[in-house]
């Protein structure tokens, strides 16, 4: 009887999203995260002080998404179909997979195809699938001002560059829940070096990170509909 139940649950899941199982997740642990779901750079920001005061996501979307909301399943999902209008200059901004050169002191710029930008702001999202409720620590590197949200709450706000693309000054504790968690990393750059980087704890090798190594993000998230029981079953099955 139990086998039948599992079979039915699996069949439901496969029908809803054939890509749900056996993804090529990015590794966590102490690996720097190389792929992010990133917004096109906000340009002409006036520098990182100005940038840190403005929620470009909210202002650019008429409040549909925000810095905090994209660190939740609901807000991250809404990035699928949204084009922002930059409040700085009216530029149209969309979301896509971006690749960080984890060793570059200008990876904030180069992740969007420019060598060394000035007065620009980077936004990136990852999903973190955890097998349990846990407290762990993130290790962010950034130049210049970084702000980070996890599961709808801001947990990091540091205007000072960390001194190198793989140098961390302020390891910060975060709470993860069993299943999907979302992290939004915003970094404002004024001039000179510009980098963003983040890794978890060496013991966090059992965390699964999306975007996947084969560039899937929205397609590997649990569906918003139907809500409730089915999503829970899917989360359970993914761990097996
Ligand atoms: Ca800088
Ligand atoms: Ca720069």
Image (cartoon, rainbow, N blue to C red):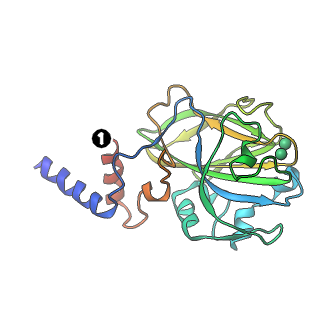
Tag 1 secondary structure = loop
Can you tell me whether the CB of the residue at mark 1 lies under 8 Å from the nearest atom of ligand 1? no
Up-down relation of residue 176 to residue 70 (above or below):
above
Return the residue found at the far top. Answer: 202
Splitting the image into four quadrants, where does ligand 1 fall? top right
Front one among 118 and 154: 118
Q: In this view, does 21 lie to the left or right of 134?
A: left
The residue at 52%/41% (across/down) is 176
Instruction: Tell me residue 150's x, y (percent).
Output: 60, 47
The residue at 56%/31% (across/down) is 31
Q: In this view, does 204 lie to the left or right of 125?
A: left
Instruction: Tell me residue 231's x, y (percent).
Output: 36, 57
Up-down relation of residue 120 to residue 60 (above or below):
above
Q: Is residue 227 left or right of residue 92?
A: left
The residue at 86%/51% (across/down) is 118
Return the residue found at the far left. Answer: 1
**Residue at image mark 1:** 240
Front one among 189 and 109: 109
Q: How many numbered marks, from 0 up?
A: 1
Q: In which quarter of the image is the C terminus?
A: top left
Label 1: few (<14), some (14–19) or many (≥20) C-alpha neighbours in 10 Å: few
Q: In this view, does 38 lie to the left or right of 118?
A: left
The residue at 41%/39% (across/down) is 131
Up-down relation of residue 215 to residue 194 (above or below):
below
Instruction: Tell me residue 191's x, y (percent).
Output: 88, 46
Instruction: Tell me residue 229's x, y (percent).
Output: 32, 59
């Amino acid at each position: 009887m139990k086998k039948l139940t599992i079979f039915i649950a699996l069949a439901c899941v496969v029908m809803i999203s054939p890509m749900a199982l056996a993804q090529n997740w990015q590794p966590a642990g102490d690996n720097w995260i190389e792929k992010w779901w990133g917004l096109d750079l906000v340009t002409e920001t006036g520098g990182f002080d100005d940038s840190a005061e403005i929620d470009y996501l909210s202002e650019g979307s008429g409040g549909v998404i925000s810095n905090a909301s994209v660190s939740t399943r609901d807000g991250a999902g809404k990035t699928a179909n949204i084009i922002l209008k930059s409040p700085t200059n009216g530029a149209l901004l969309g979301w896509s997979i971006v690749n960080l050169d984890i060793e570059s002191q200008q990876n904030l710029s180069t992740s969007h195809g420019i060598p060394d930008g000035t007065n620009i702001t980077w936004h990136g999202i990852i999903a973190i699938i955890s097998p349990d409720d846990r407290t762990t620590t993130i290790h962010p590197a950034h130049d210049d001002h970084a702000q980070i949200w996890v599961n709808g709450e801001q947990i990091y706000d540091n205007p000072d560059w960390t001194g190198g693309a793989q140098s961390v000054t302020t390891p910060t504790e975060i709470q993860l829940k069993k299943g999907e968690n979302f992290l939004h990393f915003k970094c404002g750059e004024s001039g000179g070096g510009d980098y963003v980087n983040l890794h978890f704890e060496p013991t966090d090798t059992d965390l699964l990170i999306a975007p996947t190594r084969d560039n899937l993000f929205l397609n590997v998230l649990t569906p918003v509909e139907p809500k409730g029981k089915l999503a829970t079953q899917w989360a359970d099955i993914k761990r097996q």
